[in-house]
Image (spheres, coloured by chain):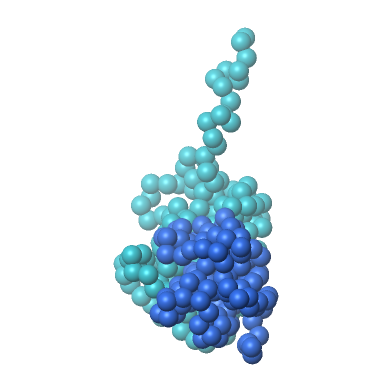
Chain colours: A blue, B cyan
Amino acid sequence: MTLKPCPVVKEIRETPEAIVVVLTGEIDLHQSPGLHAALVDVAARRPRRLVLNMTEVGYMDSSGVGTLVELLRRVNSYKGKLALVNLSQRVRGVFEITKLDKFFQIHASEEQAVQA
Amino acid sequence: MSQDGAKVRQMMNPARRVELTITSDASSLQVVRAALKRTAELQGFSPDEAHDVALALDEALANVIKHGYGGPCNMPIHITFEGVDHDDGRPGLRLTVRDHGRQVDPCTIRGRNLDDVRPGGLGVHIMRTVMDEIEWSCPTDGGMLLRMEKYRKAPQPHAAAPPGGGRNS
């Protein structure tokens, strides 16, 4: 897979059950456009499950949340599943403030996300 | 300063006034967040509170970059943060963001309906949620001025000293 360079995308793994994207760092207005482009590329492969491992994401603002909302729309449009894994309390707090936590599947581990 | 005049505040320590000027380039955001987090922690905010304050400023700056200037990344944004006291004695931080971009009526700046699940329009809602006070104004020489304030939480009841210092004298 050819991906545009994106500092907050650490790794992309493909398993029989899902594509797992490991994110890292701080996701703000500076990083969100690159992340959006990278995730659009992944979603274009229409994985049945797309898992974002956010263990190493220390910060996310509304531009990052908006990027994931856009991704959720894309994945829903082909009836795939999008799951977020291991959000820190601060990142989860941004989802809660914006009341978007109820629209995402949020899991404690990749294993749970893949099996859900 | 608050327009209602109900609260009288003063700088706790003039040395803790920080002034930054950045350009409207999103690559500066991480540096500003780091500076503000450290300032907030020096002011006695918890790491979680410092994160919230930095998040609010980040959203404010993102709005200036996206909507105030709308594209150019070489336009100035002036930022200050300084220690203030609430009238109930709690210390806090006052943040200001001054730009020279497009003016909008402050009355029209509000968060959108969160039942509508779509990207964008979330920043103002976040700012209003995590800060104690927030106010936009339109300076006569153009651009926008944003003032936000956040105060430390009051001490928990169990931490308060008992009447008479707890001594049976």
Hey, which quadrant is residue B40 in on the image?
A: bottom right
How many numbered badges does the structure rendering display? 0
Residue A15 in view = yes
Residue toward you, A97 or B102: A97
- Residue B138 at x, y percent in the picture: 39, 71
Residue toward you, A109 or B26: A109
Residue B141 in view = no
Q: Residue at x 38, y 77 (%)?
A: B103
Q: Quadrant of the N terminus of chain B?
A: bottom left
Hey, which quadrant is residue A54 in on the image?
A: bottom right
Q: Quadrant of the C terminus of chain B?
A: top right
- Residue B51 at x, y percent in the picture: 58, 58
Residue toward you, B94 or B114: B114
Q: Residue at x 56, y 29 (%)?
A: B158
Farthest residue toward the top? B169
- Residue B91 at x, y percent in the picture: 55, 46
Residue B42 appears left or right of B84: right
Q: Residue at x 57, y 55 (%)?
A: A89
Farthest residue toward the front? A16
Residue B167 appears left or right of A71: right
- Residue B141 at x, y percent in the picture: 42, 77
Q: Residue at x 55, y 77 (%)?
A: A32
Farthest residue toward the bottom? A2
Hey, which quadrant is residue A57 in on the image?
A: bottom right
Residue A18 appears left or right of B3: right
